[in-house]
Amino acid sequence: MTANQIRPRPNRRRLVSPMVVMVLGAGLALASGCGAPAKAPSVGRGIFYPPPPDSPRLQFLMSFSTAEAWIKQQSSFADFVVGGEKQAVGGIGNPYGIAASQGKVYICDLAKRRVQVVDIPARTYTELTVPGDLRNPVNVNIGPDGRRYVCDTGLRKIAVFDGDDRFVEFIGDPQRNVPIDVAFYGDELFVADVANGTVEAWDYQGRLRRVIATKGMGPNELRVPTNLDVDASGNIYVTDTELQIVKVFTQAGHFLRTIGAPGDRPGFFARPKGIAIDPQGRVFVADAQWERVQIFGPEGQLLMYFGGPSAGPEGMGLPAGLAIDASSFNAFGKYVDTNFDAQYLLFVANQFGNNKIGVYAFGHQRGMDPGPVVPSRPEATEPAEAAPSPAF
C-alpha cells in the first residue's frame, strides 16, 4: 500500500494531526476518531479543513453520543414519556440515518430501533412513534412539505410524520418494496429499494409512477442501493454499497455518469453509504470502511476529503448517514468561529466509537479567497475487495 492510499481503521487507537486532502492545489489534512465517553458534547477548538495556511472550507464544531446533555433537568433527568410509559433517554447506540431542521436533530438508532429527536433550542427529547412499533428505522429525511419520512426496512414501509412529529400515515407496498432511503424533487419521492436493487419515483401517496433504475450489473443498473439524494436540477445520486460506486440518473431514469470507483485512494470507495448534495451541487459521500467523507464537484471531480479514526472529538467511526441543513444555526451557530462565514451545517452519523453524531460548518474564512475548484481525477488503482451486503 502506497503512502497516498486510504488506510482502513486500525484495531488500535492512534493520534493523528487533523489532515485533509483537497484537490485544489492546496495541501489538505485529515481528522480522525474515537473519543473518551462523556455525556457533554465534545466541542472542537479551531479544527478546520484544510488547515492553515490554506483557506479553510469546513469547521468541525462538535460531536455528541447522548441526548442527555441537551435536555433540561426535570423531576427525573433521564426519563421521558412515550405513550404514558416512562423510558430512559440513554445514549445513542448505532445511528445510521440523520436529518435536522430548526435545531431539531433526528437520529435513526438501529440498536434501539428508535428515531430519536433532540430539540436543542427547546432542550427536549422525544421519539417518533407509530401504531405498534418501528422495527428497523434506517433513514430519515424531511420533505419540502415539512413532513418527516422514515424508511423502516423491518416494516417495509415509509412512516410519515407531520411538522410537529405526529404520525400521519404509512406509504408504500410491503409486498413489493423494502424502502431504505427517500429523497424529494417537485411533486415526487425517489425511493431506494434495498431488497430489489431498484430506485423508483412515487407520488406523495406512495403510488408508483416509474422505475428509475433496476437491479443488474450494467452501467445503468444497481445492486445494493443504500442511500440517495437529489440535486437542484432533479438528478438522482445513488450510493451502491456492493458496487462501491455512486451512480447518477435523470428524473426520467436515464443514466448520466458514475462518481468514484472501487479502490483505496482519494476519489475511490470501499463501502459508500450516506450521501448529501449542497445547494451548489457539491456531493458529500461517507465511506464506512475508509472512515472518511469525500466531497466531489457536480461532475464527479474530487474536491477534498476529511475524517478518519482519531482519539479526538472530530474522529469518525463507520460513518453512515449525512445531512445538510442551513436552518439549525439557532442551535449550533455559537460554536462557529467568529472569523468563519458558515453557509450551512453538515451532520455525520458514526456507527462506531464515542463520537456518534459529528457536526460541521461549511463555508470560508472571512477575508480569504476560498479559491477556484480545479477539476482533477486521481489515477485508477487496484479494486478493493467487494463489500458484503450491509446488515441493517
Image: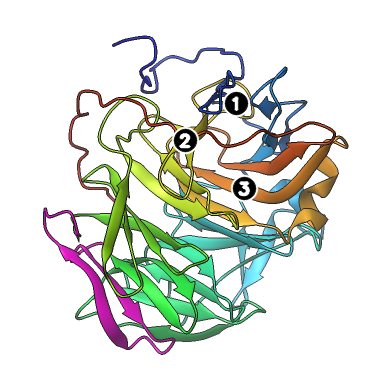
How many C-alpha atoms fall within 10 Å of the one at disc 2: few (<14), some, or many (≥20)?
some
Specify the quadrant of the image occupied by residue 81. bottom right
The crowding category of the residue bearing disc 1, from other C-alpha atoms within 10 Å (few below 14, some 14 to 19, many at least 20), is: many
Is residue 336 visible from the viewing direction of this image? no
Closer-to-camera residue (129/291): 291
Of the numbered discs 3 and 1, the one sitting upstream in the chain is: 1
Q: Marks 3 and 1, Cα distance to the nearest angstrom?
A: 20 Å
Residue at x 46% of width, y 32% of height: 292
- Say which residue label 2 marks: 375
Badge 2 marks a residue whose secondary structure is loop
Work out how far the residue at label 2 is from the one at label 3, CA to CA, in angstroms.
Answer: 23 Å
Q: How many marks?
A: 3
Reply above or below: 60 against 31: below
Q: Vertically, is 153 above or below 176?
A: above
Q: Indicate the amino acid at tag 3.
A: Leu
Residue under circle 1? 35
Q: Position of residue 297 (x, y in %)?
A: 49, 44
Where disc 1 sits, the SS reads: loop
Q: Residue at x 43, y 73 (%)?
A: 133
User: Residue 220 bears which disc, if any?
Assistant: none
Specify whether residue 247 is in view.
Answer: yes
Q: Nearer the viewer, residue 295 or 128?
A: 295
Reading the image, the residue beneath label 3 is 346
In x, y percent, where is residue 353?
Answer: 50, 32
- Identified at 20% across, 23% down, the residue is 382
Instruction: Say which residue appears at 20% left-offset and 41% top-offset.
Output: 388
Quarter of the image where one finds residue 28: top right
